[in-house]
Image (cartoon, rainbow, N blue to C red):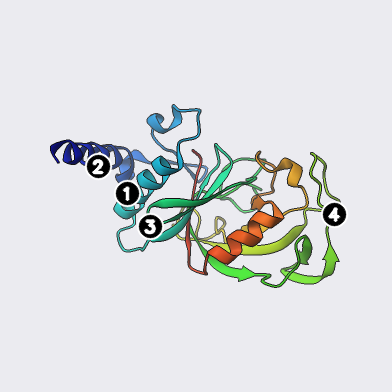
Amino acid sequence: MANYNFRNFIIGLVITTFFSCNSNKRAVDNKIELPEVIKVTKVEPSNETIANFLSEYLKLKYKNRSFKKYMYVSVKHQRLYLIKNDSTIRKYPISTAKNGIGSKQNSYKTPPGLHTVKRKIGKNVPSGGIMISRVYEGKIAKILTKKENAKKDYVTSRIMWLQGEEPGINRGRNIDSYNRYIYIHGTPEEGYIGEPASHGCIRMKNKDVIELFDFVEEGTPILILKY
């Protein structure tokens, strides 16, 4: 019991020291800068480590929110994790923005910080179905499994439209994720999944985005971090 309590104390101390204080966070071009310790590892952490660490962090930083189920996007590892009851239940390869992390309007960057799924669109759209202005008109995209560019930056299969929850970081004038139309969505350019390639949104393989769509509800939190 003593070893268990000591381990919890150390975990709590690390989380509190490196994450909970806003004084340890600085905004540069609307980026969230995390401490150097988070940047050390080049190997993707285990699912259990990610779920345990992030769940504690979220509970400390956002005390008035529920995180029984949430998503986490690691830009560094190009992964989206679906976490429920402090355990990773799904993990998907993704593509975030080719231009990197940022929240400014017209930057074509993926915004950092806490978001929620504001709207889910496309429940009955077939796999690869093209949505223009969030409307499916009956056309199916050719899915490219090699690194090839589609004719346009098509949005396919499903849309989860994100709303920023942090004023000054991803919500408000000129940095508002919802007004920037930041989505989680399917793409015909599946050959690029696993590396930064989008214009700001979070792209997924079509089968994966359809599966994820059915697992989450409107209001589900999603944390996007550089690391």
- The circle drawn on residue 133 is none
**Residue under label 3:** 85
Q: Identify the element where label 1 is drawn.
A: helix
Q: Position of residue 28 (x, y in %)?
A: 48, 40
State how far apart marks 2 and 4 are (Cα).
49 Å
- The amino acid on which the numbered mark 1 sits, given as a three-letter code, is Glu
Q: Residue at x 30, y 59 (%)?
A: 63
The reply to whether discs 2 and 1 touch (Cβ–Cβ < 8 Å) is: yes
Q: Residues within 10 Å of mark 4 (few under 14, many from 20)?
A: some
Q: Residue at x 44, y 26 (%)?
A: 40
Q: In screen coordinates, is 68 left or right of 121? A: left
Closer mark to the observer between disc 3 and disc 2: 3
Q: Position of residue 200 (x, y in %)?
A: 64, 50
**Residue under label 2:** 12
Q: Residue at x 55, y 37 (%)?
A: 77
Tell me which label, 1 or 3, sits earlier in the chain: 1
State how far apart marks 4 and 1 are (Cα).
42 Å
Which residue extends farthest front? 1
Q: Quadrant of residue 27?
A: top left
